[in-house]
Structures are given as C-alpha cells and as structure tokens.
Image (cartoon, grey):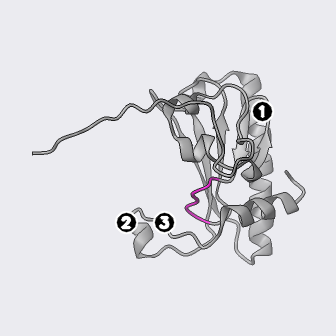
Amino acid sequence: MYKVVFTVVEVGEPKSIDGNPTHVTGPCKMYKVGDKMTVTGNPGRLLLEETDHFVAAVPYFMKRPLQTVIYYKHEQDYLHHVDEDHLTDLAGILRKNTSAVISLMEKMGREPAYNIIFHSGPGAQLYLELLPYTQETGGYEHLGIYVCQGSPRTTAEMYKKTGIF
C-alpha cells in the first residue's frame, strides 16, 4: 500500500540564497509553481541576460558544465500560445546563448554539440534548457543522477567573459 502526501507551500516574495537580488524581476508564474531553488533562490550573479519577456541564467543545480535555462516571464504554458513579438525576443536570447556555447566549447577543445529542451504543458511554466555535451556520461547519469564537473559560478563567469552576454 502506498500513501501519497501532497504539501501546499506558500511561496512568498523571491529571495536569493546569497542575499543578492534574484535573477527574475517582474511577473513570473514560476513563483507560483514553487520551484524556489531554481527560480527564486538562484543567485543574481548567475543571471546572463534579462529581457522584457525572458530570463537566461545558469541554474544553481547544473546537470552539465555550461548548462543554461531560459524562463518565460509571463503566464503561458505552451510555446504555440506565445505572442510573435515575444518569440522574436526568445530568438534573440537563444541566438546569444547558442553562440556563447559554441564559442566556449571550441575553446575547451570539444566539438560543439548541445540539446535544447522545451518544457511546457498544462499547469507548468514554459522554459528551455540548453544542455551542452561537455562531459562524458557515466553510470550515475544513466540512472538520472547527474554529477556535474563544473560550478555555476565558474560557468556564469565563463559566459560573461565571452562578451556575448
């Protein structure tokens, strides 16, 4: 017999875990969803770029070195419901992100290879993950447990040094 327990957590104003401003300003449905460590607790120093509609940042808990996430700041669950001018904004931030990844991977001596994962659905918030292939996968990764060989702070500094962000 299994027992499922749901806990409702009230999410207050966003506060970064390092005391600095959070990386998201303005409205963001992710606050309501409650992914506090990734969104509201992500230190401001991990912010790469913020536009009127999107935020690009290095997640505090990375799966791989050079991983980034792009959050949509408005209440929208599906990409095909996003306004055209917002999609233009997304294209610009995604272009910068992929250009920086390609530049950094070439400097690391690795062939540029990455996956862009779109997360959407009812009751979820639209966001993108950019996962560069920067390290070999091992046994833990095949189980869904990620061992990252980089740090979020170092990754954010590397992105900022490219001059693209």
Cα distance in 3D space between marks 1 and 2 = 36 Å
> Where is residue 28, by image quadrant?
top right
Query: Residue 146 bears which disc, if any?
Result: 3
Highlighted magenta segment, given as a residue range: 59-64
Which label sits in the foreground, 1 or 3? 3
Cα distance in 3D space between marks 1 and 3 = 31 Å
Q: Is residue 119 above or below residue 25?
A: below
Callout 1 crowding tier (Cα within 10 Å): few <14, some 14–19, many ≥20: some
Determine whether the residue tagged by mark 3 lies in a helix, strand or loop.
Answer: loop
Cα distance in 3D space between marks 3 and 2 = 8 Å
Question: 85 and 50: which one is in front?
Answer: 50
| Residue depicted at 56% across the width and 69% down the height | 148
Left of 146 or right of it: where is 86?
right
| Residue depicted at 79% across the width and 64% down the height | 158
The amino acid type of the residue labelled 3 equals Tyr
- Which residue bears the numbered disc 2? 143
| Residue depicted at 67% across the width and 61% down the height | 152
Residue 86 position in % (x across, y down):
73, 27
Residue occupying the far right of the picture: 163
Answer whether labels 3 and 2 touch (C-beta < 8 Å). Answer: no
- Which residue bears the numbered disc 1? 89
Residue 8 position in % (x across, y down):
38, 31
Determine whether the residue tagged by mark 1 lies in a helix, strand or loop.
Answer: helix
Residue occupying the far bottom of the picture: 109
